[in-house]
Image: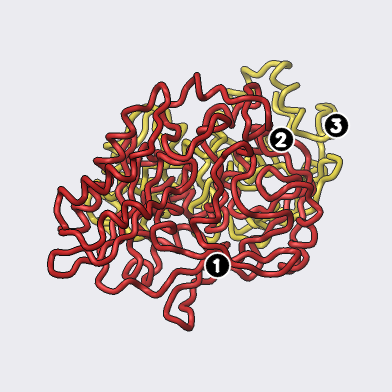
Chain colours: A yellow, B red
Amino acid sequence: MSNNPKLDQVDRSRRKFLKSTGTTAAAGVISAYLPAHASGAAEPARESEVNHPTVEGAVPITLRINGKDHKLNIDPRTTLLDCIRETVALTGTKKGCDHGQCGACTVHVNGKRVLSCLNLALMHDGHEITTIEGLGTPDALHPMQKAFLECDGYQCGYCTSGQIMSAVALLKEPCGPDDSSVKELMSGNICRCGAYANIVAAIQQVRKNG
Amino acid sequence: MRIFEFIRPPDPAAAIATAAQSKTAQQGADVRFMGGGTTLIDLMKLNVETPARVLDINRLPFDKIETTSDGGLKIGATVRNSDLAYDKTVQLAYPVLSQAILQGASAQIRNMATVGGNLLQRTRCVYFRDTAMPCNKREPGSGCPAITGHNRTLAILGASEHCIATNPSDMCVALAALDATVHIQGPKGIRRVAFDDFHLLPGSTPERETVLEPGDLITHVTLMPPFKRSRQVYLKLRDRASYEFALASAAVVLTIGSGTITQARIALGGVGTKPWRSPEAEAALKGKPANDATFREAAEVVLQGAKPQSENRFKIELAKRCLTHALRTAAA
């Protein structure tokens, strides 16, 4: 029941499952993020319309995400996280606490890991933003994605994209060789399931294998 | 979050001119400079901060770390905490600053947070962050429920009957011990403020946290030339091993010659309403033998005037042991 055509384009089984179990109430909630003309199911909105909501005071911006420029018109209050998920419809980046306490929303800006929930999207025009979707593909996983699979670095998976984005950035940061150094530099990513031991193992596997 | 106008001023003068239209000083003002956003956006989401205009200062020319002509260090206001902590000069000559920063927040937040923003970091007191509760800092005159409520993490030094909120910064504790200078550009020109004078005690005006006036922009912080042969330690004690605010912390800069302390600079974190520099402890250390008895005596001196709240009496002994252990580690 998603009213966002861009979300509908995402060919993932979980997305299809959510669509098949969605309710009209949920659709109402989703439409609150979208312009009125994009919520009519009868006539699918064109991409340009989706990207140009008629929010009062909206500001034009070009955001470069995963090597692709997105011309957007956004409410100044939009965080980078909400922009990535709701406007650009890249839903791999997760919203956990929305207050900088959990790390689920971690993305890279100009190669450095940041919390997208504590940034305004407007602060990032001209910056190179990378999300989990820009890291690897199902057919060509990033070594860190592969290591998380092999080491079972997750249970529910909700924190995983943030963990992996953090872990990939860590590879280029000053970090001691031991597990405790990895734990210290990964402390900004909370895993409610407690998969920490396997997450550290995955990161160490990538560091050892270069 | 309330709607606001997002502005990217082209130069410092434009930023200052716009911010000078604000009715109040920088903290809680209706015009706000935005650095990394890690405190401000968080508090805007909670409607604790409700600026009408947000000025993005991240592209102003304050992002350099440079050696000054006198051999000190000039740190631009928008230098990221991680860049400062990993700077080679800082790691070698001012290690207490690097240690303090790396024990604060998380890697992601350190990549975002700026030096200027860290100086203006606001308290984590739960009543301040909850607009459903009274708070003299957020809403002057409304009262302080922390005094009879949840105050385990709050201040035992520098509190008043109006506010007992702790300053949460680690970086500022190190800057206090290093005798840093804050450089400010404002509508009336430029000025410099000694670090210990920058933050204010709450007194009867806890809403006023620093000496900044409307339009004042922190441009950079300077450090004195490195203290030769000094031993520096930042020790932080907290409820979990990482990614947590201090219950007590100590920044120590010691110089020892032939077993005698020739120079000492001491500041405590997590226990004060501002980064807590202690000239009294420094006097108690100078000229004394570098041993446990001296260290413990200095710790007693710092905490002499401490006033515990209902839930945090433990902080007095914790802070004493924290400082004693930091001094012992530095002297070893």
The foreground one among B41 and A104 is B41
Q: Residues within 10 Å of mark 1 (few under 14, many from 20)?
A: many
Circle on res. A36? 3
Q: Residues within 10 Å of mark 3 (few under 14, many from 20)?
A: few
The foreground one among B161 and A186 is B161
Residue at 57%, 27% (x, y): give it: B127
Q: Which of marks 2 and 1 is in front?
A: 1
Dot 1: chain letter: B
Residue A1 is left or right of residue B165, and the answer is right
Dot 2: chain letter: B
The foreground one among B198 and A17 is B198
The foreground one among B225 and A164 is B225
Does residue A9 appear in the picture of this structure? Answer: no
Hey, which quadrant is residue B91 in on the image?
bottom left
Residue A57 is left or right of residue B221, and the answer is right
Position above or below: A118 against B35? above
**Residue A208 pos. (x, y %):** 24, 56
Element under disc 1:
strand
Can you identify the residue that label 2 sits on? B1
Amino acid found under the numbered disc labelled 2:
Met
User: Mark 2 vs mark 1: which is more N-terminal?
Assistant: 2
Give the Cα distance between marks 1 and 3: 45 Å
Amino acid found under the numbered disc labelled 3:
Ala
**Residue B144 pos. (x, y %):** 58, 25
Does residue B325 appear in the picture of this structure? Answer: yes
